[in-house]
Image (cartoon, helix red, strand yellow):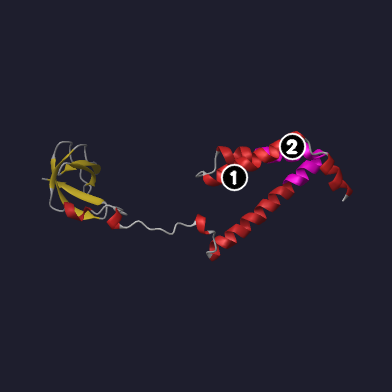
């Protein structure tokens, strides 16, 4: 208890500023996709704050270890909530886009069956063809087809467009 009170007397304005900056940076990281600048510098700021506040290097290492154990426990609790489906409502997207609103989940190439076009690039066996005024990624059945050759769609499955030379 005495060591804890001694630790509190070591708190300076710089350590308070570093702590607040670290918390703010980590809070910003929560709203930014990925793990990047804000998260890294937030953690560095918190660790530097711990070492400035600590009286010895050993105490700084111990406090940093305790800090990471607490973060790990919080992460495990959060993961427990995720697996049980009990997340805050703002973290879960409840609205779904529909086809009526213009959303298409994937391209369906079935409507291209039998249509003809011209290769914009060589097809070896993948390339690009212009079919009906639009450009499509196409594949052949393994054969090489030169650029500029006319092709016909022989298969359209999902987003896969298979062509052969005309």
54 in the magenta segment: yes
State the mark number for residue 27. Answer: 1
Q: Which residues are magenta?
A: 43-64
Q: Is residue 88 in view?
A: yes
Count of picture labels: 2
Extreme-bottom residue of the structure: 84
Residue depicted at x 73% and y 47%: 65
Position of 126 compared to 50: left or right? left
**Front in this rendered view, residue 17 or 61:** 17
State the mark number for residue 15. Answer: 2
Position of 3 compared to 155: left or right? right
- Residue 58's image quarter? top right
Residue depicted at x 65% and y 53%: 72
Residue depicted at x 70% and y 52%: 69
Residue depicted at x 22% and y 53%: 109
Residue neighbourhood size for the residue with mark 2, other residues' Cα within 10 Å, grouped as few (<14), some (14–19), many (≥20) = some
Q: Position of residue 125 (x, y in %)?
A: 24, 44
């Amino acid at each position: 208890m005495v060591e804890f009170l001694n630790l509190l007397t070591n708190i300076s304005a710089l350590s308070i500023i570093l702590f607040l900056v670290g918390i703010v940076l980590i809070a910003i990281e929560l709203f930014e996709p990925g793990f990047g600048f804000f998260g890294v510098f937030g953690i560095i700021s918190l660790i530097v704050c711990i070492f400035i506040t600590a009286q010895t290097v050993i105490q700084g290492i111990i406090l940093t270890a305790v800090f990471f154990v607490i973060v790990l426990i919080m992460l495990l609790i959060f993961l427990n909530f995720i697996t049980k489906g009990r997340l805050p409502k703002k973290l879960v997207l409840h609205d779904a886009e529909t086809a009526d609103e213009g959303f298409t989940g994937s391209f369906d190439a079935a409507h291209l069956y039998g249509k003809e076009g011209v290769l914009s690039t060589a097809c070896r066996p993948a390339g690009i063809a212009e079919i009906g005024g639009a450009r499509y990624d196409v594949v052949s059945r393994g054969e090489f087809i030169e650029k500029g050759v006319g092709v016909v769609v022989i298969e359209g499955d999902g987003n896969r467009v298979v062509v052969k030379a005309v």
